[in-house]
Image (tube, grey):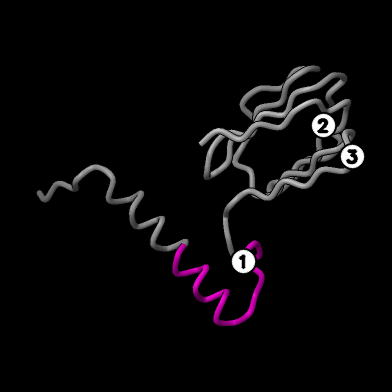
């Protein structure tokens, strides 16, 4: 039985993303349409919209930690609530103080 070296899967995944991005560029399609990278949109300090997330790690009134393919997104503030959630995106509302992104 042939054994794989650690890290080959991650390298292939990065190459696949690169190929997607190249194809998107050639076809003049916005990168975010074909990418699995998270897209974070804020509306003032009251609302955060996160696309391409993988799951919720932690949720309290003061902190929301969200897993993505490229790291953990931490949203902190007060009176935090999930206004809407689907398989592809999530909307957090509250008094947003900070958004951190850790790879």
Residue 81 position within the rendered picture, expressed as x and y whole percent measured from the top left: 84, 27
Circle number at residue 44 = 3
Q: CA distance from mark 3 to mark 2?
A: 16 Å
Would you say the residues marked 3 and 2 are in contact, meaning their CB atoms lie under 8 Å apart? no
Task: Count neighbours of disc 2 (C-alpha within 10 A) and say few if under 14, some if 14 to 19, many if 20 or more.
Answer: some
Task: Count neighbours of disc 3 (C-alpha within 10 A) and say few if under 14, some if 14 to 19, many if 20 or more.
Answer: few
Q: In the picture shown, does residue 97 fall above or below 7?
A: above
Magenta region? 18-33
Which residue is tagged 1? 31
Would you say the residues marked 2 and 1 are in contact, meaning their CB atoms lie under 8 Å apart? no
Q: In the picture shown, does residue 77 fall above or below 86?
A: above
Residue 20 among those drawn in magenta: yes
Left or right for 90, reference 11:
right
Residue at 72%, 46% in the rendered image: 40
Residue 102 position within the rendered picture, expressed as x and y whole percent measured from the top left: 55, 33
Task: Count neighbours of disc 1 (C-alpha within 10 A) and say few if under 14, some if 14 to 19, many if 20 or more.
Answer: some
Residue 16 among those drawn in magenta: no
> Helix or strand or loop: what does disc 2 sit on?
strand
Residue 15 position within the rendered picture, expressed as x and y whole percent measured from the top left: 38, 62
Predominant secondary structure in magenta? helix
């Amino acid at each position: 039985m042939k054994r794989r070296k650690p890290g080959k899967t991650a390298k292939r995944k990065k190459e696949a993303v690169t190929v997607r991005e190249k194809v998107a560029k050639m076809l003049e399609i916005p990168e975010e349409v074909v990418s699995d990278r998270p897209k974070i949109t804020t509306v003032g300090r009251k609302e955060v919209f996160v696309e391409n997330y993988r799951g919720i790690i932690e949720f309290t009134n003061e902190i929301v930690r969200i897993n993505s393919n490229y790291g953990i997104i931490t949203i902190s503030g007060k009176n935090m609530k999930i206004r809407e959630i689907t398989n592809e995106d999530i909307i957090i509302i509250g008094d947003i103080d900070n958004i951190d992104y850790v790879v």
